[in-house]
Amino acid sequence: MSMTDAEKRVVDGTTWDQFCDALKDAGKIIRSSKAPQDVFNQAEGYRYLSRLLRGGLEGFLEFRDPLFPELRCGAHETIKLGADNPDNRYESATVSPDHEYRITGNRGTVDYLGISTIINKYASGGTMEVTGHVDARNMEIGPNGEIEIIISRAEKSGNWLPMGEGTNSITVRQTFQDRISENAADLKIERIGAKDDRPAPLTAEKIERGLMGAAMFVQGSATLFENWSESFLPTLNELPPADQAYCQSIGGDPNIFYFHSAWQLADDEVFIIDAPEIPECQTWNFQLDNWWMESLDYRHHTIHVNKHTAHYESDGSVRVVVSHTDPGVPNWIETAGHNMGTMCWRWIGAQKHPLLKTRVAKLADLK
């Protein structure tokens, strides 16, 4: 029996060589002329590519079958991208609009639970269009937290999450105010009407598609967020509202209003953010990221603050202080060994989106 072209490429090593060449080419993104060229930031850049690769291999090779979807956590403490929120648990699953799906489980007590259908093009065009969205505030939930959500093109009664013609993925966001006391939602996804209970064996076409999809994900994601970081340079050490339409086009939550920019501090400087007005909202948070738009190491450092953890002034306002060393004031955000990077502030579920005031000061003057 003659081999297909894909089988020939697997057998003669072409598929693997093309995969490795694509990864090598991704290294050029880290060496972009506007990216920091020092050893520390370059080292973080290459670690970033390795993290994207781990996520890409899981997403495009191990969990890519829309006939047997599984919710997986694709962004976490050691896989980070696009100003990943330290307060979030992110999960995703591959789906197809040719089928219908059911999510079941328990809502838990996590502060915010939102689920979206999306068209994920991070591996090609750099966008992540939302085609449908529901969150726990408008779901029917059982007396003990039971949830059932139907995902389909055609409208259904009860909890219904629409899919579009190009929908290829589900994204679940769980946002915690207090991870210690809140219980995560426990959810699973299944294809409705499935008669076969085992996936088909691996084929040459699947391994080729998975490897190249992972490599393109590394290239596409790294390029997307490198370009975004570079666009923040004109507002260095300011924190203006981001382009909300653009945020939504690359996967932002429809309930969030975003502020993004870049920061840079000398060893004796601090960055002060004043939020004179905190609007009525589900929650809010601020986080510090590196140049590659990865959240800093929140396992070992305090690099973010939210509605629950923040200290408020007597007038209800909030001041956040970014500093290399402890300045002895509330709401200290650690730079975790960084002198520059990016940052994000979110108003989540707010009808008003007050502006923020920022300034750089000397640490000695603050004390």
Image (tube, rainbow, N blue to C red):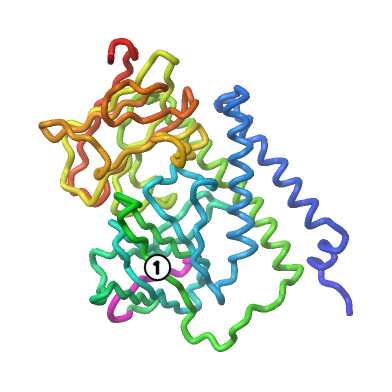
Q: Quadrant of the N terminus?
A: bottom right
- In this orientation, which residue lies closer to the viewer: 25 or 359? 359
Residue at 43% x, 35% y: name it: 301
Residue 305 place in picture, x, y as percent: 32, 38
Helix or strand or loop: what does disc 1 sit on?
A: strand
Q: Position of residue 61 (x, y in %)?
A: 65, 62
Residue on which the image places disc 1: 186
Residue 325 falls in image quadrant: top left
Asked if 92 appears above or below 220 in the picture, the reply is: below
Question: Which span is picked out in magenta?
Answer: 156-168
- The residue shown at (76%, 68%) is 204
Residue 353 placed where, x, y %?
Answer: 21, 41
Q: What's the amino acid at mark 1?
A: Asp
Badge 1: few (under 14), some or many (20 or more) residues near its Cα, within 10 Å? few
Instruction: State left or right for residue 269 relative to residue 203.
Output: left
| Nearest the eye: 98 or 105 | 105
Q: Is residue 193 above or below residue 304?
A: below
Residue 44 image position (x, y, % from top left) = 58, 34
Residue 229 falls left or right of residue 144 = right
Q: Nearer the viewer, residue 98 or 45?
A: 45
Report the predominant secondary structure element of the magenta stretch. loop
Q: Is residue 87 magenta?
A: no
